[in-house]
């Protein structure tokens, strides 16, 4: 049913509403539109910017609706700063992208016509540049071509999405995906609001030990200078600029090191006195560039690192980061991730998440049994399929990513014999991709369709007059797409499991009472300064920052939430998702 147009202002009713649409009203005001479960308007209310948090808090306490808005990143940070948290939301911009491309949606024409919703807001804008008025973010959104977040258009897009979901081939699956994706939008904002506790002094110590003392601006660190000199001496080229790949490559060739590129993998295949210091130099350079003193100055303040997460930033549904590189923090820097005094870090990562998801999706009982309650790769060894754990790992990763040569190529055929259902699922996904088809995750996210150029090149390669080079290029392109779709179904479903895990954990932690006598973690903000909360996420890993007295309960909540995610996505399946779980003061103590 399509929602009725909202009147200018009707007092919000005392009756419970299922949905609450939040959008721009008249002038510098926000408009809240309450809807019942059928989408009928129950009432509206407008409020000035400075009264928004109080209105939302009151309505959340009275109704606990699912909040419908253009972007959690645009609305939620201001509420969190005022101490207001929400239980649920529907993030229209995130869901729009899913529904427009999902094979489960029978008719996406109306959604695709609303092209303004295709462009996400800059995730930096809502957090850094709101200033005195709530709707300054619309200046940025207008530049990017995004739809202004006015209430009427927000409501219209919500109607389009509800129609698409209700008429989908399997609406139940899509509703789970919508809920999980939208919960992720809330979590991303909360992770930034709370921040990751970060020990600046220890980070500086790590950099100093690895690179030498902090240099003056524009000057390389002492140890990098020394190591660079060793490389030049070994190459007998005192002037080669090591940070210039083309010139370095020419110097390597002159020294008799025949490599096609300066990548670490290529260099490791050769023996020469220049290789070891060069690899050392490249490692130093990556550390300095990605997480050196400049990064520390920009991203860590008041003992907190606050990255900008982008839910659904990868085509498979995995998260990305548009600032701070949270998804690329090297293990070398993990000791700087340190709990506040009187607090603990409760860390958990899932053992072999993607292979377990594959086993559950395919219902392959032999593969499920191999990982039941233990390391899956060791279980494959115990089943007599391969001799070593490393072989098992290489084989499974080859199955997931399309490895056909070397050790992977030797092991994958054994996996096909022993895990026929699992291998049939990924092999089938690869075959669909090679034909130019689309594949879909467990809950309904579909891979992008091929473009016209790809289709035309494949057709041209099958013509009688096609040359050998043209045919080989088409075959290579088809294989590349097959590898992509092979992994898409598994990686995308693993991302859905991880979102479900975090969503369940977030709700459990929200029920924890504030610890009145705990030392306040003030930089975590008004919401999270006295109770356990999510502080970090990396694909298959979460870290909770908890008062010491809540650490054990937080650990139990992490385990329970993982079990709940497995039951939610794969009801009736015996699959389990074992966790490597620790309670420490520093992340590196795991």
Image: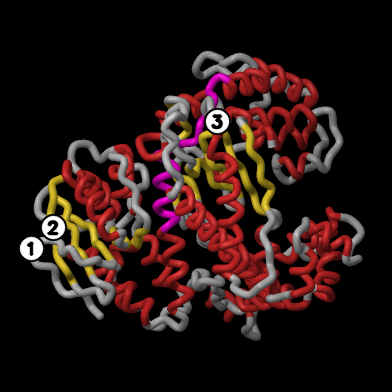
- Lower position in the chain sequence, tag 3 or tag 1: 1
Name the residue carrying label 1. 8
Which residue is pictured at 31% across the width and 45% down the height? 84
Which residue is pictured at 86% across the width and 65% down the height? 410
- CA distance separating discs 3 and 1: 49 Å
Left or right: residue 516 compared with residue 221: left
Q: Is residue 160 magenta?
A: no
- Lower position in the chain sequence, tag 2 or tag 3: 2
- CA distance separating discs 1 and 2: 8 Å
Q: Which residue occupies the foreground of this view, 381 or 407?
A: 381
Local secondary structure at mark 2: strand
Which residue is pictured at 58% across the width and 56% down the height? 560
Q: Which residue occupies the foreground of this view, 549 or 465?
A: 549
Which residues lie in the magenta part? Answer: 183-201
Name which quarter of the figure residue 39 lies in: bottom left
Q: Mark 2 Cα within 10 Å, few/some/many (few <14, many 20+)?
A: some
Q: Is residue 191 magenta?
A: yes
Residue 495, image x and y in percent? 55, 60
Tell me: residue 208, above or below residue 156: above
State which quarter of the image contains the N terminus. Answer: bottom left
Name the residue carrying label 3. 339
Name the residue carrying label 2. 45
CB atoms of marks 1 and 2 within 8 Å: no
- Lower position in the chain sequence, tag 1 or tag 2: 1
């Amino acid at each position: 049913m399509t929602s009725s147009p909202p009147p200018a202002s009707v007092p919000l009713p005392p009756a419970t509403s299922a949905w609450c649409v939040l959008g721009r009203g008249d002038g510098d005001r926000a408009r809240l539109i309450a809807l019942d479960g059928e989408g009928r308007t129950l009432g509206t209310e407008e409020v000035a910017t400075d009264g928004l948090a109080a209105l939302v808090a009151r309505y959340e306490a009275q109704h606990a609706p699912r909040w419908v808005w253009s972007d959690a990143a645009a609305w939620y940070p201001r509420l969190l700063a005022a101490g207001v948290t929400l239980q649920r939301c529907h993030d229209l911009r995130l869901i729009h992208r899913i529904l427009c491309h999902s094979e489960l949606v029978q008719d996406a024409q109306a959604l695709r016509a609303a092209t303004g919703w295709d462009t996400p807001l800059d995730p930096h804008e809502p957090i850094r540049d709101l200033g005195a008025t709530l709707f300054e973010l619309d200046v940025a959104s207008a530049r990017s071509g995004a739809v202004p977040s006015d209430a009427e258009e927000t409501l219209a897009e919500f109607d389009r999405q509800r129609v698409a979901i209700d008429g989908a081939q399997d609406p139940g699956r899509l509703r789970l995906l919508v809920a999980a994706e939208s919960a992720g939008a809330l979590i991303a904002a909360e992770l930034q609001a709370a921040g990751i506790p970060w020990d600046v002094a220890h980070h500086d110590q790590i950099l100093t030990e690895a690179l030498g003392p902090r240099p003056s601006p524009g000057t390389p660190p002492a140890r990098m200078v020394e190591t660079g000199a060793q490389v030049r001496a070994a190459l007998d080229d005192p002037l080669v600029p090591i940070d210039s790949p083309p010139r370095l490559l020419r110097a390597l060739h002159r020294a008799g090191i025949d490599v096609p590129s300066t990548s670490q993998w290529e260099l490791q295949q050769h023996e020469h006195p220049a290789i070891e210091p060069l690899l050392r130099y490249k490692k130093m350079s990556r550390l300095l560039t990605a997480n050196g003193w400049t990064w520390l100055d920009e991203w860590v303040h008041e003992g907190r690192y606050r990255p900008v997460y982008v839910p659904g930033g990868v085509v498979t549904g995995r998260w990305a980061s548009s600032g701070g590189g949270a998804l690329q923090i090297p293990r070398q820097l993990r000791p700087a991730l340190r709990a506040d005094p009187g607090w603990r870090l409760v860390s958990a990562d899932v053992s072999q998440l993607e292979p377990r998801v594959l086993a559950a999706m395919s219902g392959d009982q032999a593969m499920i049994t191999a990982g039941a309650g233990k390391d899956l790769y060791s279980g494959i060894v115990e089943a007599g399929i391969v001799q070593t754990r490393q072989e098992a790992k290489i084989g499974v990763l080859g199955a997931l990513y399309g490895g056909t040569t070397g050790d992977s190529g030797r092991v994958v055929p054994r996996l096909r014999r022993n895990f026929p259902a699992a291998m049939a699922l990924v092999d089938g996904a690869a075959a669909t991709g090679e034909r130019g088809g689309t594949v879909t995750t467990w809950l309904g996210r579909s891979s992008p369709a091929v473009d016209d150029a790809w289709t035309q090149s494949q057709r041209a390669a099958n013509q009688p007059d096609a040359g050998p080079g043209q045919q080989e290029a088409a075959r290579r392109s088809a294989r590349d797409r097959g590898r992509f779709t092979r992994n898409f179904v598994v990686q995308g479903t693993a991302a859905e499991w991880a979102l479900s895990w975090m969503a369940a954990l977030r709700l459990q932690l929200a029920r924890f009472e504030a610890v009145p006598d705990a030392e306040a973690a003030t930089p975590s903000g008004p919401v999270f300064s006295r109770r356990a909360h999510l502080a970090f996420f990396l694909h298959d890993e979460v870290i909770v920052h908890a008062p010491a007295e809540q650490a054990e309960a937080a650990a139990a909540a992490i385990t329970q939430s993982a079990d709940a995610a497995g039951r939610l996505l794969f009801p009736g399946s015996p699959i389990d998702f074992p966790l490597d779980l620790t309670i420490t003061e520093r992340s590196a103590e795991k």
